[in-house]
């Protein structure tokens, strides 16, 4: 603005050291942005290379399998042993029914062994409803058969 022939200067007059500080901060911000962009580009390139390598391995595996199948031709059907047939029949017949967890007095809390159970009914519930229990060694649905507290 002009006031009586004089140019009005801004109130914010910066010294040369302040200009240098602003310049250095600007350069640091630019370097940080460029570094971030380079890092991001390298990560994407590495992910692409890894994905391409996996795809190549999958394709090679498919080729190998196909070559093996053509070389071997049709194989005879596998004959299962009596023991295997019996085990398959038992597992397909005995699928334990799960109890509604909301109405049950028990809940899966990580216990796995008979020694951690308070009753035979609780052990039976755990075998039917909780994964990774080690209470039914012969998988017949009756847990803790060797526990003298209940048998």
Image (tube, rainbow, N blue to C red):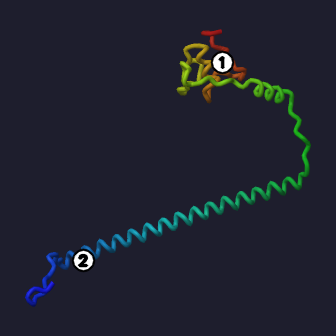
Instruction: Classify mark 1: helix, strand or loop.
Output: loop
Seen in the picture, residue 59 relative to 151 is either above or below; the reply is: below
Total marks shown come to: 2
The residue at the point 24 percent across, 73 percent down is: 21
Q: Quadrant of residue 30?
A: bottom left
Structural crowding at the residue carrying mark 2, measured as other residues with C-alpha within 10 Å and reported as few (<14), some (14–19) or many (≥20): few
Q: Quadrant of residue 94?
A: top right
Q: Is residue 61 above or below residue 15?
A: above
- Apparent side of residue 74 relative to residue 136 in the rendered image (left or right): right
Q: Quadrant of the C terminus?
A: top right
User: Who's the residue at 71% across and 57% down the image?
Assistant: 58
| Position in image of residue 100 (x %, y %) | 59, 24
- Which x, y percent locates residue 117? 56, 17
SS at mark 2 in the image:
helix
- Quadrant the N terminus occupies: bottom left
Residue located at (89% from left, 35% from top): 79
Q: Which residue is mark 2?
A: 20
Horizontally, residue 55 falls left or right of residue 42, namely right
Marks 2 and 1, how far apart at CA: 80 Å
- Work out whether mark 2 precedes mark 1 in sequence or the reverse, and give the earlier one: 2
- What residue is rendered at 52% in x and 63% in y? 43
Where's residue 4, x and y in %? 8, 88
């Amino acid at each position: 603005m002009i006031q009586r022939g004089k140019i009005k200067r801004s109130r914010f007059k910066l010294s040369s050291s302040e200009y240098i500080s602003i310049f250095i901060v600007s350069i640091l911000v630019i370097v940080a942005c460029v570094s971030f962009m380079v890092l991001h580009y390298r990560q994407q390139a590495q992910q692409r290379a890894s994905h391409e390598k996996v795809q190549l391995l999958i394709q090679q595996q498919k080729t190998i399998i196909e070559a093996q199948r053509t070389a071997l031709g049709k194989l005879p059907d596998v004959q299962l042993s009596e023991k295997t047939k019996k085990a398959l029949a038992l597992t397909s017949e005995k699928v334990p029914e799960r109890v509604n967890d909301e109405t049950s007095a028990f809940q899966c809390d990580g216990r796995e062994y008979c020694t951690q159970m308070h009753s035979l009914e609780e052990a039976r519930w755990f075998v039917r409803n909780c994964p990774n229990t080690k209470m039914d060694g012969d998988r017949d649905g009756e847990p803790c058969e060797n526990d003298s507290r209940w048998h």
